[in-house]
Amino acid sequence: SGKMMAGSKRGGESARDTLELASLPPSMLRHIWPSERLGIGMQTCSWVLRELGQWQATTKLRALGSASLEPVTSCDIARKLSRFRHCKIVLDCRNFRPHFRAWNALLAGLAESAVVPISLVHLDLAQSQISCNDARRLAAVLVRCESLSLLDLSGNPHLGAQGICTLAPALERCSRLSHVELARNGMFEKEIGQMLEVLGRRCSVEYLGLAGNHMGLSAAKKLADALPFFSTLRELDLTGNHIGSKGMESLASSFRACSSLSHLKLAGCRIGDEGASHLSLVLRDCSATVSHLDLRMNTISTAGIRVLAETVGQCSELRSLCIAGNKVDSPGALALAQALAQCKRLERVCMNGNEVAGEGAAAMLRLLHLLSDLQHLDLRRKYLSADDKATLPPRPPPGSRAPQLLAGGVRLGGAGLTAVLDVVRGFRGASLLELSATGIGAEGAAELAEALLQRACALSLAHLSLAHNTLGIDGAGRLARVLRECRALRVLDLSGARLGCDGVAQLMVALGECAALATLSLASNNIALDGAARLAAGLSECKRLQTLDLNRNKVGSEGAGELAKVLPACESLRVLRLGANRIGNEGAESLSGVLGACTQLVQLELGGNPVADRVWTSLLAAARERTPLCSIVW
């Protein structure tokens, strides 16, 4: 929006780019975030703040964020912020790791300012290496922050017990404070008790984050004593605190005062079956408000789930339930499914890492047919952390009626497969079907293909995984008929499906019509040289293919040569995996020869192949000469 002006060297100062803001209307200056990661230097940042001080219409200022400051610049920025007399200031110092003198200068400047503490509404100091010595200066700022609504001090273990005790009294004046994040600060019983007493009596807290703070039974009792004062509390995060069943018992009676509680996170709290029975009392008291419940990694077995099921069904507002990484088997899943059928607003259910199979899996799958709002059901056998973004599928678009079904590793059996087919037919398809290692076989794949062809169900399918199911040539042929209709398909995983060269040949004819296909995995299918040649012939039709996985397929050097011929024509291919394929020196040299022409390729995996050191050297040299560089995994 602005115009860049290059400053000239004056008085020994180096030239720098500045922003000309004089011609900008005040309406364009609503949100400003000068930051190193946006390419704006802190010297320029200081100048921008000086100029913006003239604009009274500025409503929010977000400064610093991951910057590297000198002490003089820090104090100067604090003084410039004082010009904002009629605005709301958002000070973002997340991941701020300056020299300690820069911290002192910034905090001292804020404390001396007559305006900044009064205007400060958001203060984000997460993972900023705040020490106990900084707490006194920060307290001098907080004691005047009457408009402060958000305070994030998470990830500052060096703050220590003394630092927390220093900050607690300063928050008594912050009556508008509604969002408090204190995760991973190493707080113990005394500090938690003192901080909660101030927050509960003086503030109107709606979000309280205490994750990862070594809270045991004693700290849980302190929290139980303070909870009755948190009448406005809506979200409570206790993830990773080993409060145990006894701690849950102490907390259960106190939640009655939290009449607005909607989000409760108890992941990794080790509450067990006994704690689950106490939690059921909480859900009974908050059944009209609880909408998100996280119980991951709590060693809850079927006995505990059955107790919870009695009250979960009464939670009319429940939208998300996560019980991943527990010890729930099929009878427990069956009892839970019967209860969840009453939760008409349920949107997401995550049960990965449990022992659900057969009738239990079928009962959970029927929920997709019974609950019109349910969009995501995860029954995968392997536990996957919610923090591992690589394992999480993309959320469906708002208003989408095509659900996401993840059941990898679950032995579905006849009942489970029938439930899957009912889901596919009943909702005109699904946006994601993850059915790897479910034992559906060629016949199950054929039935699934027929279901997808009915009522244009295939049109909504974006992700399909049938990996480690014995499909064979017959299953590949049936599947090929469906793939011609999957115009929105982006990910196809058929690893370990025993397709062989003939099965791959049938698939490649159909994949040419999948215009959106971006990821194709055919690892461990024993396609050999003939399959590699047929695959190469069809690759040019996959215009948007970005990732191709052919690990463990015995393609050999000749097969690698066939693939090398078509790689320059694959304009979108970025990742190619050819590990453990018996590729020798000749095949590696063929790939090295075309590497310069494949400017889009950023990663080539050749690990586990018998290639000589001299060939590796030439391959790496070819990768280094390219722009951009290509990563070679060997």
Image (tube, rainbow, N blue to C red):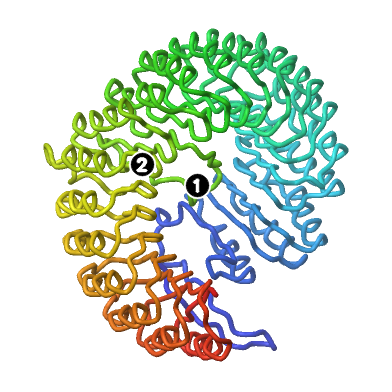
* Of 147 and 512, the residue lying toward us: 512
Task: Say which of 289 and 507 sits in front.
Answer: 507
Answer whether residue 579 is visible to the viewer in this image. Answer: no
Vertical position of residue 227 compared to residue 216: above or below: above
The residue that disc 2 covers is 435
Where 275 falls versus 400 (above or below)? above
* Rendered residue at 50%/47% (across/down): 59
Q: Nearer the viewer, residue 538 or 543?
A: 538
Residue 542 appears left or right of 269 = left
Answer yes or no: is residue 133 visible: yes
Which residue lies under the disc numbered 1?
59
Q: Is label 1 in a helix, a strand or a loop?
A: loop
Q: Going from the N terminus, do you reach mark 2 or mark 1 first? A: 1
Using the rendered view, name the quadrant where residue 152 is placed: top right
Q: Amino acid at mark 1?
A: Thr
* Amino acid type, label 2: Leu
**Residue at image point 56% right, 91% down:** 614
How many discs appear?
A: 2
